[in-house]
Amino acid sequence: MKILITGANGQLGQCIKKQSTAFSSLEMHYFSSVQLDITKAEDVNKVFAQGNYDWCINCAAYTNVEKAESDKEKAFSVNAEAAKHLAQACSKNKVKLIHISTDYVFNGKKDSTYTEEDEVNPINVYGASKLKGEQYIQQELKEFFILRTSWLYSEFGHNFFNTMLRKSTEKDCVLKITTEQKGTPTNANDLALAVLQIITNNNSAYGIYHYSNEGKATWYDFAKAIFNNADKLNQVDLIASNEYKTIAERPVNSVLAKEKIKNKLGLKIAEWDKSLSDLQKSL
Ligand SMILES: NC(=O)C1=CN([C@@H]2O[C@H](COP(=O)(O)OP(=O)(O)OC[C@H]3O[C@@H](n4cnc5c(N)ncnc54)[C@H](OP(=O)(O)O)[C@@H]3O)[C@@H](O)[C@H]2O)C=CC1
Ligand SMILES: Cc1cn([C@H]2C[C@H](O)[C@@H](COP(=O)(O)OP(=O)(O)O[C@H]3O[C@@H](C)C(=O)[C@@H](O)[C@H]3O)O2)c(=O)[nH]c1=O
């Protein structure tokens, strides 16, 4: 099977590269943002017309939640308009699409886990742009999986996990970490494996699915677990805080319900804290 991966040098793209070594039946074709800018519809059409792909995994996105508030046009261009071009190219060339979306499509006011049927109502520009992308894909294409995930981290790229470990090397490190949001940290390597399993299982139960690791945490809980696993809790002054100022608002609760993906696609999902400690042991 021939697979096109966009945004290949981002965090998820690199995890897919790492995990795909165990999937010898897949012929992977990686395109970085320089090799294929998905906002350029003509370039997208050219790559699709030349490739004869079976699947496209869209890892390309505008993911800076803070910057998106003042850079709305760019966020919508990448996360919404370009997702539309991709879906149109997929439809025209009979390519199946796996697209990644976010827990930030929800407003966070629900006090239990979010299912795929729950009302979407984003409270920041990034979330709104990702929601528009989901809507375009549903309009343009039948054979798609949209996987909404949350709080991705890994050894690659820019994420909360790497930020915490980097800051902990600074002298007299004091970290005030918010307890105001509850969600699920998700190992991007686990998501990468899930994506590759969906492709190889050749399941045709297309649609929107939630995928995160199991369990829930605040960002403070997440930071504490990272430092505990790294045996660094006594090297940092870690303070639970409800005063960390941000430009973008985040949903207070964004824990995702995973029953649909487990039941319909048969995926097994690890607990967030176990997956985190396994990753840290392996690095
Ligand atoms: N990170 C997270 O916590 C979460 C992410 N998601 C979603 O998961 C997916 C993967 O995220 P993640 O890997 O963490 O994000 P990253 O920001 O690490 O990677 C995104 C990649 O997209 C590339 N990109 C940006 N604009 C374009 C463009 N116009 N054309 C082609 N490529 C482009 C970036 O390249 P460059 O660096 O050159 O701009 C980067 O390599 C995204 O859809 C994101 O919305 C969902 C929930 C949580
Ligand atoms: C660095 C830092 C952050 N925070 C807070 C800010 C914020 O509320 C929370 C997380 O901060 P970040 O900026 O790392 O994460 P954020 O950009 O909100 O992460 C989101 O990214 C997008 C792409 C998604 O799709 C989401 O699922 C989610 O992972 O922690 C602190 O409280 N203290 C700190 O020192």
Image: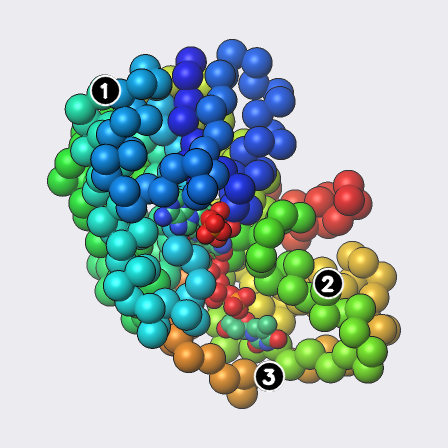
Amino acid on which the number 1 mark rests in the picture: Lys
Q: Which residue is mark 3?
A: 241
The residue under the point 51% across, 12% down is 25
Disc on the earlier residue, 1 or 3: 1
From the viewer's perspective, is the residue at label 1 or at label 3 nearer? 1
Q: Quadrant of the C terminus?
A: top right
The residue under the point 34% across, 18% down is 51
Judging depth in this view, the residue of 16 and 151 nearest the camera is 16
Residue 227 % position (x, y): 76, 64
Residue 221 % position (x, y): 63, 67
Relative to residue 6, is residue 241 drawn left or right? right
Residue 149 % position (x, y): 43, 49
Crowding at dot 3, Cα within 10 Å, few <14 / some 14-19 / many 20+, comes out as few
Cα gap from disc 3 to disc 2, whole angstroms: 19 Å
Image: 201 above or below 276: above
Disc on the earlier residue, 2 or 1: 1
* Whether residue 260 can be seen here: no
Judged from the image, the secondary structure of the residue bearing numbered disc 1 is loop
Would you identify the image quadrant in which residue 232 lies?
bottom right
Q: Which residue is mark 1?
A: 94
Q: Which residue is mark 2?
A: 165
Q: How many marks?
A: 3
Judging depth in this view, the residue of 172 and 228 nearest the camera is 172
Disc on the earlier residue, 3 or 2: 2
